[in-house]
Amino acid sequence: MVNDIVAGLDSNKWEGFRSLHLLEQHRIDSFKDWPFSDQSTCSISKMAEAGFYWTGNKRENDTATCFVCGKTLDGWESEDEPWKEHAKHAPQCEFVKMDTAERDLSISQFLLILGTVVKGNINKSCKVFKQKFILDNEERKEEFANPLK
């Protein structure tokens, strides 16, 4: 049902979600140097279906991260099953708990995932802002802590 709605929308409207890896196609597109073939158990399409996008590099090309819970896993082997590995290492993940591929999500499930992803990104942005603010104002910290000096 979600795929029907997504297919009916202008693709440009979904581009904002690309950085969130919200859609399975965006996760597939992220895999630039995945070491396993399309015939392996942990192919790119199976990794993306299980919620993973590629976060590797040339040296460590078997690293992937969940778009919902942020769990990063590496050391993949061709016979690893992405859903099982995801559930084993991140049983608290909302996507894992649903145990449903994107194409089979209901609208309410999709909205729950969307809310979880957006909330996680807001929290991450706030944390980065706070750390940057602290670093940028380190020199003035003493001034605020002891205003009478």
Image (cartoon, rainbow, N blue to C red):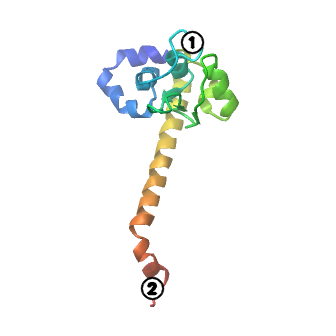
* Badge number at residue 147: 2
Label 2 vs label 1, nearer the camera: 1
Name the side, left or right, on which 141 lies relative to 79. Answer: left
- Residue at 45%, 30% in the rendered image: 21
Residue 66 image offset from top left, x and y in percent: 54, 32
* Badge number at residue 40: 1
**Residue at the extreme front:** 59
Q: Is residue 16 visible?
A: yes
Q: How many marks?
A: 2
**What is the secondary structure assignment of the residue under circle 1?**
loop
Q: Is residue 97 visible?
A: no
> Cα distance, mark 2 to mark 1?
64 Å
Q: Is residue 148 above or below residue 2?
A: below
**Residue at the extreme bottom:** 149
Q: Which image quadrant: the C terminus?
A: bottom left
* Badge number at residue 85: none
Residue 85 image offset from top left, x and y in percent: 65, 26
Tell me if mark 1 has few (under 14), some (14-19) or many (20+) residues whose alpha carbon lies within 10 angstroms of its own: some
Name the side, left or right, on which 38 lies relative to 8. Answer: right
Name the side, left or right, on which 8 lies relative to 88. Answer: left
- Specify which label sits upstream in the sequence, 2 or 1: 1
Of the pair 41 and 58, the residue shown nearer to us: 58
Q: Amino acid at mark 1?
A: Ser
The image quarter containing residue 137 is bottom left
Residue 32 image offset from top left, x and y in percent: 41, 24
Q: Is residue 20 above or below residue 99?
A: below
Of the pair 143 and 79, the residue shown nearer to us: 79
Residue 133 image offset from top left, x and y in percent: 41, 63
Tell me if mark 2 has few (under 14), some (14-19) or many (20+) residues whose alpha carbon lies within 10 angstroms of its own: few
Q: Amino acid at mark 2?
A: Pro
